[in-house]
Amino acid sequence: MSQVNNESQAKTSDIADNMTDESQLQLVSFGVGSEEFAVNILQVQEINRMMTITKVPESPDCVEGVINLRGRIIPVVDLRKRFDMELTEHVESSRIIVVEVDGRVLGFIVDCVHEVLRIDRNIVEATPSITSSSVDSSYIMGIGKLEDRLLILLDLSRLFNLEELRAIESTVKHGAARNAA
């Protein structure tokens, strides 16, 4: 039980570290499936409409491919695949959110981008314990309780483990070589 409490305290501390001031978080919210997620706005570099994605052989399952964004090769992760959700075709509202994760630039395909918002720290609760071993909630920083909906706050630094990040970096190398050819 103390391990759960320590994890909750650590996640609450993480939330405090991402504050725009002492009492608020500034976030970009987006939809994937029927869920609404948010990330710290400081990690978002830009939001783009869907564009041509170059498939890269032997890339991790969640990696859709790479994009060439003003001369930079950026791996693109489909969050539906990462979250093990039902796959659908991309639509007009689909976007690629370009973020920085631990010094690495990645694109995330989302179904839609909702808004930039500020929420009070006191409406964010630590992630509830999930006992199913098939569900990984380590990358969920907390749950924001808004008036009419719940907002899942993602900790991008925990979304991928080191092995997965290395595999994604390998995708970039292969994609850059492919684009150069």
Image (tube, rainbow, N blue to C red):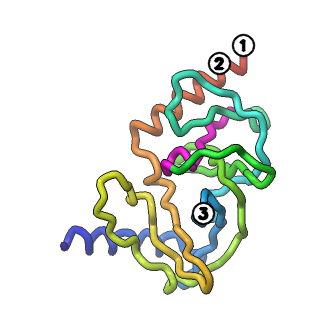
At x 22% / y 68%, what residue is drawn? 3
* Contact flag, marks 1 and 3 (Cβ < 8 Å): no
Q: Is residue 17 left or right of residue 7?
A: right
Q: Which mark is residue 34?
A: 3
Q: Marks 1 and 3, Cα distance to the nearest angstrom?
A: 40 Å
Residue at the (19%, 73%) spot, across then down: 2
User: For residue 164, which quarter of the picture?
Assistant: top left
Q: Residues within 10 Å of mark 2 (few under 14, many from 20)?
A: few
Which residue is rendered at x = 73% and y = 51% of the image? 95
Q: Along the line of sight, which residue is nearer the eye, 12 or 138?
A: 138
Q: Secondary structure at mark 3?
A: loop
- Give the secondary structure at mark 2: helix
Helix or strand or loop: what does disc 1 sit on? Answer: loop
Mark before the other along the chain sequence, 2 or 3: 3
Range drawn in magenta:
73-84
Query: Looking at the picture, how far across and down is residue 160, in whole percent?
Result: 45, 46
Neighbour tally class for label 3: few under 14, some 14-19, many 20 plus, Cα within 10 Å:
few
Front of the two marks 1 and 3: 3
Identify residue for label 1.
181
